[in-house]
Amino acid sequence: MTLADTLQADLRLENDTIENYSEYSKNELWGIVERYTATKENDIIKEIFLHNKTMSAVAREQGITIDRVRQIKEKGLRKLRIGKAKRELLEKFDIAEAGLFRGGLNNYKEHNFTSIVEHLAEKRLEAEERYKRHLMEIEEMHRKRVDGIRHCVEPDNRKRGL
């Protein structure tokens, strides 16, 4: 067996591991969705997110309006965002709280077309710059005060011959 064969075998093993974990994660996720949503909510959420169907396609298949599909989907997603479902999702998938990043295009526009994370980073940098300027101003005031005191003290030392 050559080095290339060994490396190639390791890559296959790594890819297989990733695929197995991915499949396991999907099963865990959809298990949580099933446990915490009603059957109708579960079906609609799966159709939209698992099978990549549009709400209009789901509405046609289910024989209901698009607005009703949206309502059912939102109700199911709300259930997943609270209580035990939320806790289980956070524990199993280390999902970051999305609440800070909600708001869509309006918040995006509000912050000069940067994400909220970028906006917060910019604000922090601005605050650090203000702090440094303020610190330099204080140091300058202190230096002037010390120079003024030296100036007052030095003439007295000259008179004494020091």
Image: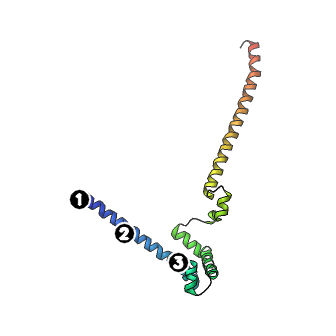
Real-space Cα distance between discs 3 and 1? 47 Å
User: Residue 75: x percent and y percent?
Assistant: 63, 79
Real-space Cα distance between discs 1 and 2? 21 Å
Name the residue nearer the viewer: 57 or 107.
57
Q: Secondary structure at mark 2?
A: helix
Marker disc for residue 24: none
Q: List the single residue furthest toward the bottom.
A: 63
- Sequence-wise, the earlier of marks 3 and 1 is 1
Residue at the image point whose x is 72% and y is 26% from the top: 147
Q: Secondary structure at mark 3?
A: loop
Residue holding disc 3: 53
Residue at the image point whose x is 43% and y is 73% from the top: 23
Query: Disc 3 vs disc 2: Cβ atoms closer than 8 Å?
Result: no
Residue at the image point whose x is 75% and y is 22% from the top: 151
Give the residue type at disc 3.
Lys
Residue holding disc 1: 2
> Which marked residue is nearer to the observer: mark 3 or mark 1?
3
Give the residue type at disc 2.
Asp
Q: Is residue 38 visible?
A: no
Query: Disc 1 vs disc 2: Cβ atoms closer than 8 Å?
Result: no
User: Residue 112: x percent and y percent?
Assistant: 65, 55
Give the residue type at disc 1.
Thr
Marker disc for residue 16: 2
Colour theme = rainbow
Q: Secondary structure at mark 1?
A: loop
Name the residue nearer the viewer: 37 or 63.
63
